[in-house]
């Protein structure tokens, strides 16, 4: 089960990493607020979780008796939202006498790559870029990774969403901005992207230049929008979108390129909603590396990736998991 943000998810997988059901119920209600409202997300998870669970079991054509382990996201995410999944998982595992494995959401995104048919084997580099996280990890083993870089401010998906909003597009902004950008010239405006970036203060020389920062880019777009008259803006919206998108794609690709050079790795996996972006994928594809992108429904938030991660993590027996709490921030992946 995965309920860390606004998607209520339940999946059934087997030990070999074949996905038998992967149900994702997106709460469309947040669109009108321009972002996820935590309290509303929790309430919807409560209404949906049992239905989503039943649907996953039905699609997998199994019953509760066939389950061997319950895996659930423990954090990071919205605590109220996480608690719905965690409590449901505890109740279900407790009532059935099953073991439970709590999973870190980001480790889950990495573990999407361990599922069939990609079934990537460590070591590889993994870029998770979603609405809530931007993380570059050196995946050294199935159960963990070494974090090489993360965002110092906004997540890459958040940068897409905020840019889209400034351009008058709806939420989630990434897909809308990508559509608008198709008619635009990516070189029309110079936005800070790949070349410049965060100072990465306090990092080792190995990690320097591997963190991300998108707040300067967002401000640059704001200034450009202010400079343009209404008629110019109407004419140049697609150019702005294309240039802005290119800057995000370059920022992501540059860090991946540096990390490849420093680790000597030649394989990269992408995860998170931003992995759906065509320009990001094209840029990564031009690197001197094998690029793996799981199916779209395994890139965005889903429960199959959480179950996948659980295959390599310790199982907790009843009743030791009853005291587990959700956590809002931080990564536990080592
Ligand atoms: O992984 P995800 O579904 O949810 C989490 O945030 O965990 O990622 C959603 C994010 C949103 O910010 C959305 O705008 C972005 O991924 N996104 C995209 C695209 N599709 C989704 N960003 C750019 N281009 C896309 N095609
Ligand atoms: Zn996510």
Image: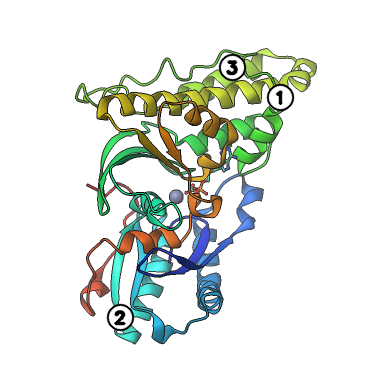
Q: Quadrant of residue 305?
A: bottom left
Residue at the outermost right position: 231
Q: Estimate the spatial distance between the alpha carbons at disc 3 and disc 2, rounded to whole Å.
A: 56 Å
Q: Mark 1 — residue?
A: 238
In this orientation, which residue lies closer to the viewer: 53 or 168?
Answer: 53
- Judged left or right of residue 254, residue 200 is left
Q: Estimate the spatial distance between the alpha carbons at disc 1 and disc 3, rounded to whole Å.
A: 16 Å
Residue at left offset 70%, top offset 31%:
180
Tell me whether circle 1 and circle 2 mark residues in contact (CB < 8 Å). no
Q: Mark 2 — residue?
A: 98
Q: Mark 3 — residue?
A: 223
Q: Position of residue 272 (x, y in %)?
A: 47, 45
Residue at left offset 67%, top offset 38%:
176
Q: Position of residue 222 (x, y in %)?
A: 59, 22
Q: Estimate the spatial distance between the alpha carbons at disc 1 and disc 2, rounded to whole Å.
A: 53 Å
Q: Position of residue 24 (x, y in %)?
A: 55, 62
Tell me whether circle 3 and circle 2 mark residues in contact (CB < 8 Å). no
Where is 244 relative to 2, above or below? above
Q: Earlier in the sequence, mark 1 or mark 2?
A: 2
- Judged left or right of residue 161, residue 97 is left
Q: How many other residues sit within 10 Å of disc 2, few (<14), some (14-19) or many (≥20)?
A: many
Q: Earlier in the sequence, mark 3 or mark 2?
A: 2
Is residue 321 visible in the rendered image? The answer is yes
- Judged left or right of residue 20, residue 325 is left
Q: How many other residues sit within 10 Å of disc 3, few (<14), some (14-19) or many (≥20)?
A: few
Q: Quadrant of residue 169?
A: top right
């Amino acid at each position: 089960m995965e309920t860390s943000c606004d998607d209520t998810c339940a999946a059934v997988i087997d030990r070999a990493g074949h996905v038998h059901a992967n149900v994702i119920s997106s709460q469309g209600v947040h669109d009108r607020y321009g972002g996820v409202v935590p309290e509303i997300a929790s309430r919807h998870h409560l209404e949906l979780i049992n239905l989503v669970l039943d649907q996953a079991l039905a699609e997998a054509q199994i019953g509760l008796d066939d389950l061997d382990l319950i895996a659930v996201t423990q954090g990071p995410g919205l605590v109220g939202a996480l608690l719905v999944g965690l409590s449901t998982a505890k109740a279900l595992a407790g009532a059935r006498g099953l073991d439970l494995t709590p999973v870190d959401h980001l480790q889950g995104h990495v573990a999407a790559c361990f599922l069939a048919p990609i079934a990537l084997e460590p070591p590889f580099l993994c870029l998770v870029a979603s609405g809530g996280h931007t993380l570059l990890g050196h995946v050294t083993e199935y159960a963990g990774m070494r974090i090489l870089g993360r965002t110092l401010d906004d997540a890459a998906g958040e940068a897409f969403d905020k840019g889209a909003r400034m351009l008058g597009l709806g939420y989630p902004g990434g897909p809308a901005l990508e559509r608008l950008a198709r008619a635009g010239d990516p070189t029309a405006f110079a936005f800070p992207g790949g070349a410049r970036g965060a100072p990465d203060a306090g990092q080792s020389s190995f990690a320097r230049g591997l963190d991300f920062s998108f707040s300067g880019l967002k401000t640059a777009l704001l200034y450009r929008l202010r400079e343009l008259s209404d008629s110019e803006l109407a004419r140049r919206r697609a150019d702005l979108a294309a240039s802005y998108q290119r800057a995000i794609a370059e920022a992501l690709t540059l860090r991946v390129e540096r990390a490849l050079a420093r680790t000597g790795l030649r394989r990269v996996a992408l995860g998170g909603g931003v992995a759906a972006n065509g320009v990001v994928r094209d840029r990564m594809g031009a690197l001197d590396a094998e690029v793996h992108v799981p199916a779209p429904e395994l890139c965005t938030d889903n429960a199959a990736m959480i179950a996948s991660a659980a295959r390599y993590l310790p199982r907790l027996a009843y009743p030791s998991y009853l005291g587990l709490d959700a956590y809002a921030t931080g990564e536990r992946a080592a």
